[in-house]
Every structure is written in C-alpha cells, then in structure tokens.
Amino acid sequence: MEAPTGTEEEEEERGNGFSVSAEERDRWIDRAMHMAQEALESGEVPVGCLMVYNNQMVGMGRNEVNETKNATRHAEMVAIDQVLNWCLRRSKNPAEVFQRTVLYVTVEPCIMCAAALRIMRIPLVVYGCQNERFGGCGSVLNISSDDLPNTGTAFQCIPGHRAKEAVEMLKTFYKQENPNAPQSKVRKLNGHKR
Ligand SMILES: [Zn+2]
C-alpha cells in the first residue's frame, strides 16, 4: 500500500524507529493535559506527563515540587519512578522497558529531566509547548540531541501538540502564584476551569 502524502488522514509520526498514530498521540496528550490541570489546581507548575509502553500506560506524573518541598520532583521524574515500580512488580527489566517507552508531556523537558531521559534511554518524547526558561530539548540547551557519550543516548522529540493550552496554563500559574510562598489550602481554581 502506498503511503498517502499531503493528507491529514492516517496521520502518523515517527521517531527513533517508533511510530505514533494521531489517534493515540491525541489520547495520551489529552491525559497529560489533565495531569497538568491538576498540578495547576494544586499550586504546582502545570506540567503533566505519562509514559507508554506497548500501548499501555506504565507511569504518569505531574510536577509536585511544592508539595514534596523537593526541587527535583518534576513530572518526568515522578513518572520515571512509577515505571521503575511497574517493572519491579512485574519482574521486568527496566532497561528493556524504557528503551521501548514513549513519553508524552505537556511542556518541553527541562535540562535535568532531559538528562534523566537520556540515561534511561527513552527513545521518543512527544511534547506540547517550549520551555523557554529551562528547556533541555533546544530552548536553552540541546541535551536531547547533543553528542554526550557518557550520558545515555540521544532521543527524538515531536513538539507542538496542544502547545497553546500548555502555554496558557504556564502563564496562569506564573501570573497568580509565587511558587515559594506557603500554599493556601483553598483551591483557587476549584472545579474544571479550562
Ligand atoms: Zn524537569
């Protein structure tokens, strides 16, 4: 069968030997957006992500830096820990799982997370908006694709999915919150504001 060119239907994207259909991409990014919204409502930087292995979600996370008072608890780090637990419970080899796992995240991974993703050897990252402050996939540094022989393997990025919504959430967060201030127990964004 010939691959259709120039049509929006049967859209498919590829990276590092992995292909992601438009349908599955939209489904997973949608869930990541919900995680980001939950982060925003909890007074956290609104980033949400999930990790998909064999068409199955094996880990998910949202930023929980303020809640844990631990600056490293970005969404991606939370999700990596969940995948490790998933592997442990099923006696799977994490190296094999991570090498076949796609990360869906609402914001470009930061420098720290991009390095962690390299070390875990995740091949493909589908993300929403750019991370202009800390981005490790081109915005500030190119950790994702640089030649770093002692830091895992390079990974491919497919950016720009629901970027506008992801940016809006970040803007809302940085407008209303001082991330270092003690969090009020009252949720300002109660309900399902979008
Ligand atoms: Zn990060």
Image (cartoon, grey):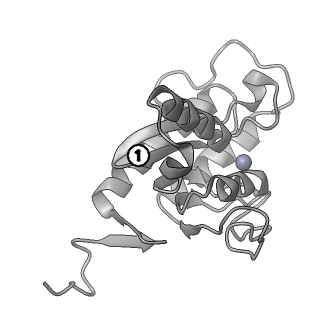
Direction left: furthest residue = 1
Establish if 160 lies above or below 105: below
Residue 134 location, quadrant: bottom right
- Horizontal and vertical percent for residue 160? 52, 65
**In the image, 148: left or right of 173?**
right
Establish if 67 lies above or below 18: above
- Quarter of the image for the N terminus: give it: bottom left
**In the image, 15: left or right of 26?**
right
The reply to whether residue 46 is in sight is no
**Residue at point 43% right, 47% down?**
52
**Residue at point 77% right, 19% down?**
183
Of 85 and 32, the residue lying toward us: 85
Establish if 192 lies above or below 9: above
Direction top: furthest residue = 185
Give the SS element for disc 1: helix
User: What is the count of numbered marks?
Assistant: 1
Of 77 and 176, the residue lying toward us: 77
Direction right: furthest residue = 180
The reply to whether residue 135 is in sight is yes
Of 167 and 92, the residue lying toward us: 92
**Residue at point 28% right, 57% down?**
23
**In the image, 166: left or right of 132?**
left
- Horizontal and vertical percent for residue 74? 70, 40
- Horizontal and vertical percent for residue 59? 50, 37
Residue 9 location, quadrant: bottom left
- Does the beta carbon of the residue at mark 1 sit less than 8 Å from ligand 1? no
Look at mark 1 in the image and give the residue it sits on. Answer: 30
Looking at numbered disc 1 in the image, what kind of residue is underneath it? Asp
- Horizontal and vertical percent for residue 8? 26, 75
